[in-house]
Image (cartoon, rainbow, N blue to C red):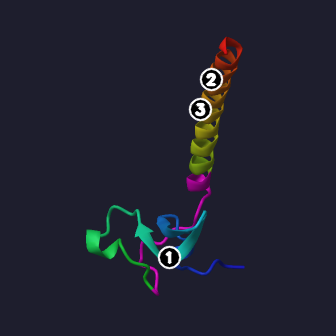
Amino acid sequence: METEKTCENCKFFVPYYIKRRSHFYPVQSGVCENETLRCRDRRKRNPEPCGLWQKEDGEHARGERAAVESALLAMAKHVEEIALILRSQSKDE
């Protein structure tokens, strides 16, 4: 089955999100990261994809996952350091 060509499933499309309370929700808009488009054409979701549409290859998702994993590892290190500080302070009291 052929993939429907829309901005939302294009390799270059990055959706915008809004924050409500403690959650993020995608909105019906985003930005096209294809640098060959004019700046004003890149800031909207078009009803019809442009001629530059490309199938999502998963590379963007893999890059995001790697960035999240890296951030979580850094956070874990900081949490361990904070725990050590708190333990040493409680022993001093």
> What residue sits 62% from the left and 23% below the top?
81
Q: Which mark is residue 36?
A: none
Residue picked out by circle 1: 7
**What amino acid type is highlighted by mark number 2?**
Glu
Q: Mark 2: which secondary structure? A: helix
Position of 91 with respect to 60 (left or right) is: right
Few, some or many C-alpha atoms within 10 Å of disc 3 (few <14, some 14-19, many ≥20)?
few
- Mark with earlier residue (3, 2): 3
Q: Image quarter for residue 84?
A: top right
For the view shown, which residue lies furthest in the top direction? 92
In x, y percent, where is residue 90? 69, 19
**Are dots 1 and 2 in contact, CB under 8 Å?**
no
Residue picked out by circle 3: 74
Q: Main secondary structure of the magenta part?
A: loop
Q: Image quarter for residue 74?
A: top right
- Establish if 80 lies above or below 34: above
**What amino acid type is highlighted by mark number 1?**
Cys
- Establish if 57 lies above or below 63: below
> What residue sits 39% from the left and 77% below the top?
44
Nearer the camera: disc 1 or disc 3: 3
> What residue sits 61% from the left and 81% below the top?
4
Q: Report the span colored magenta.
A: 47-61
Residue picked out by circle 2: 81
Nearer the camera: disc 3 or disc 2: 2
